[in-house]
Amino acid sequence: MTEIQEDLGNGLILRRATRADTEALADFNARVHSDKGWDEPDMGVSAWVHDLVARPHPTFTPGDFLVVEDTARSTSDRPCVVSSSNLISQTWTYAGIEFGVGRPELVGTHPDYRRRGLIRKQFEVLHRWSAERGELVQAITGIPWYYRQFGYDMALNLHGARRGPETGLPALKDGEPEPYLVRPATPDDLGFIAEIDEAGHRHSLVNCVRGAAQWAYELSGRNPTNAAHFELRIIEAAASAGASAGASAGAGECVGYLAHPPVRWGSHLWATRYELKPGVSWWAVTPSVLRYLKAVGLTLRPYFSDPDGGPPFKGVAFELGEQHPAYAIAADWLPIVSRPYTWYMRVPDLPAFLRLIAPVLERRLAQSDMAGHTGNLKLDFYRDGVVVSLEQGRIVDIAAWPLGRESDGERVSEGAYVRFPDLTFLQVLFGHRALDELHHAYTDCYDNLEGRLLVDALFVKQPSEIWPIA
C-alpha cells in the first residue's frame, strides 16, 4: 500500500515512491533536469533514477524518493509525477571523525506546478527522515541561492579544476616506453583503491567514507549510461619505470588509481579522482596519466550528442578540488584554472555537531597561541547562539545559547564573542572561509579580540573535495 505523507489539495498528494514509479520518475527527472529543456530528456539522468529505484544500492531504497502526484492526471498504468526529490544517506568525516549526512538529490518540479511550495513540503519530510536516521548534517549541490530558503548556507568547497589543450600535454620521446600504464579496475583491486583513497583524504578537511559495498557499487553497481557513473582505473608501474616512482615499484605494481566518466563533458575528458600511494612520485606518474586521458578522450563521445556529433575533443582536465598535489606538477600542461563552486550545508543542531568534533577543536587549540585557554566563547547568531566553555584548553561544555532576554550590550559585554549573521558560521565551521574573510564580506560580523583569536584557533580554513555516493 502506498504511504501517503500528505494530501496537498487540488488532487495533489505527497507520498513515498515505489518500484512501480520507476518509469514515471525516470522520465520526469530526465526532463526536469535536462540542460536542453523539458522536450529533450537527459538519458543519463534517466539511467541514474532507474539505478536508484530499480537496482540494489548500498544506502538507498525506492522509498527514499518522494513524489508529488497529480491524481487527476494519473492513469491506472502510470502516475503523473509533477515534483520529486530523494534522500541519499551516507557517512562523511570531519578531520577523520565520522558523522551521518543526508543528501537530498534530484530535486525538481514541473514548470506548470512551481511556486506552490511543493519543494518546501518535501524538504520538511526529507529533514525529518534525516533526523530520524541520526544524521547531524544535510548537504546538497544546486543552483545559486535556492536552498538558502530551507536552512542551508553555501559553506563547503565543491570541485575546482585545472584543464589544458591536448596539444600542450607531455609527450614521450621517440622510442621511449611509457613508464606507467592505466588499466580497468577489477573487484580484486577494490581493497587497494579503498586504501589509497583513504590516504588521499589528507588533502581534504571533509570526506565521504566508502565501505566495501560502496566501492563495489562504484565499480559495477551502476548502468554505464548513468550520469553519476565513473570508470575506475588502476595505475601500474611498467617494466621501464625503474626507481622513478620514488618507491621500490616493480613492473606491474599498483601505484595509484584514477576515476573519470565514460564520456567527455563537452570538449574535455575530466579526471575526477587521482590518488597515488604515499611515497610514489607525482612528478614521475602524472605525465603518463595525462597521456592516458588524451588517448581515451580521443575515443569517447561527448555526454550530450548533438546531431553533428558534438564538440570535438580539445583537451583534458583534473577536477580534483581547489588544491591537489597533481596541480603543481601539471601547472604548465593544464594552465586554465576553474575555481570551485560550493556545497549547501545544513546543521540543525550545532551544539551536537560541535560536541562530536570537539577532539579536533581541542587539538587545534593546543597547537595555537591560545593553548591552555580558560573562558567562554559565545558564538552569537543574533537570534540564537552557542557557548563553548573552555578550561585550561579543554572543552568542558558546548550548549545552545538562547538569546532575546538580554540587551545587546549584556549579550556581548562578558567573555569572548563573535557575531555571525544568518548562517555564515557554517562557512567557518567547514573550513570554507576564514573569519577575516567574513569580516570583509559582512559588516555585521564582528567580535572582540579574545573571540577572534579563539575562532581562528578552533576553526581553520582548509579546502575539501567531496566525492559523494550517488
Image (cartoon, rainbow, N blue to C red):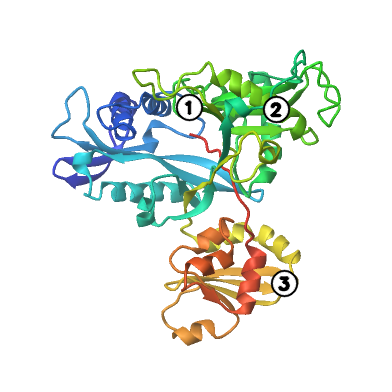
Question: Residue 115, can we see it?
Answer: yes
Q: State if disc 1 and disc 2 touch (CB < 8 Å).
A: no
* Residue placed under numbered mark 3 in the picture: 370
Q: Residue at x 56, y 59 (%)?
A: 433
Left or right: 288, with 18 as reference point: right
Q: CA distance from mark 3 to mark 2?
A: 44 Å
- The amino acid on which the numbered mark 2 sits, given as a three-letter code, is Pro
Q: Residue at x 48, y 48 (%)?
A: 343
Judged by depth in the image, the label closer to the viewer, 3 or 1, is 1
Left or right: 206, with 196 as reference point: left
180 or 328: nearer the viewer: 328
- Whether 93 is drawn above or below 415: the answer is above
Q: Residue at x 72, y 61 (%)?
A: 363
- The amino acid on which the numbered mark 1 sits, given as a three-letter code, is Ser
194 or 146: nearer the viewer: 146
Q: Quadrant of the N terminus?
A: top left
First reached walking from the N terminus: tag 3 or tag 2: 2
Element carrying mark 2: helix
Quadrant for residue 279, please give it. top right
* Residue placed under numbered mark 1 in the picture: 267
First reached walking from the N terminus: tag 3 or tag 1: 1
| Tag of residue 377 | none
Residue 284's spot in the image, x, y percent? 77, 29
Quadrant for residue 68, please give it. top left
Callout 3 environment at 10 Å: few (<14), some (14 to 19), or many (20+)?
A: some
Residue 43's spot in the image, x, y percent? 36, 24
- The amino acid on which the numbered mark 3 sits, given as a three-letter code, is Met
- Whether 196 is drawn above or below 264: the answer is below
* Residue placed under numbered mark 2 in the picture: 287
Residue 106's spot in the image, x, y percent? 37, 37
Question: Residue 192, can we see it?
Answer: no
Report the number of discs.
3
